[in-house]
Amino acid sequence: MPVTPEDVRHIAALARLGVDPERVPQLVAELNGILSHMDVLTKVDTDDIDPALGVGAGGMPLRADDGAQYPLLRDRADFAPTMRDGFFVVPRLASHLDADGDGSA
């Protein structure tokens, strides 16, 4: 199904993107070119091809996080006014405060 100028304007509105009306025909042509290329790719016979290793829902295995840390030019405490147990303490967001405004909910 080809992309229409209305499709481009609708998608731009959904993404809250300003698209110059003069650019819409160019975008339609580019998107339809991409879709026709995808149609060509769907016709490629891949029945005898092994699936790519490491690709899938499981993702790639993670390596162990070991080894020496990279030294910082400044102390960690310089990055935040308050630290506790080696972690930065940041103020609670206003959207997470309870009705009393103290965030103790």
Image: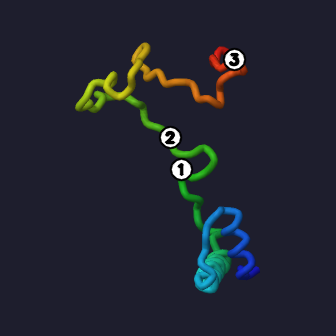
Give the residue number, with chain letter if any, for mark 2: 61
Compare marks 3 and 2 and give the one earlier in the sequence.
Answer: 2
Compare marks 1 and 3 and give the one earlier in the sequence.
Answer: 1
Q: Are marks 1 and 3 in contact (CB under 8 Å)?
A: no
Residue 21 % position (x, y): 63, 81
Residue 56 % position (x, y): 61, 51
- Which residue type does callout 3 highlight? Asp
Could you tell me which residue is drawn at 39 percent across and 22 percent down?
Answer: 81
Q: Quadrant of residue 67?
A: top left
Within-10-Å neighbours for mark 1: few <14, some 14–19, many 20+: few
Give the residue number, with chain letter if any, for mark 1: 54
Within-10-Å neighbours for mark 3: few <14, some 14–19, many 20+: few
Tell me: residue 63, above or below residue 11: above
Tell me: residue 61, above or below residue 23: above
Residue 69 visible? The answer is yes
Give the residue number, with chain letter if any, for mark 3: 100
Compare marks 1 and 2 and give the one earlier in the sequence.
Answer: 1
- Which residue type does callout 1 highlight? Gly
State the SS at label 1: loop
Count of marks, rendered view: 3
User: Nearer the observer, disc 1 or disc 3?
Assistant: 3
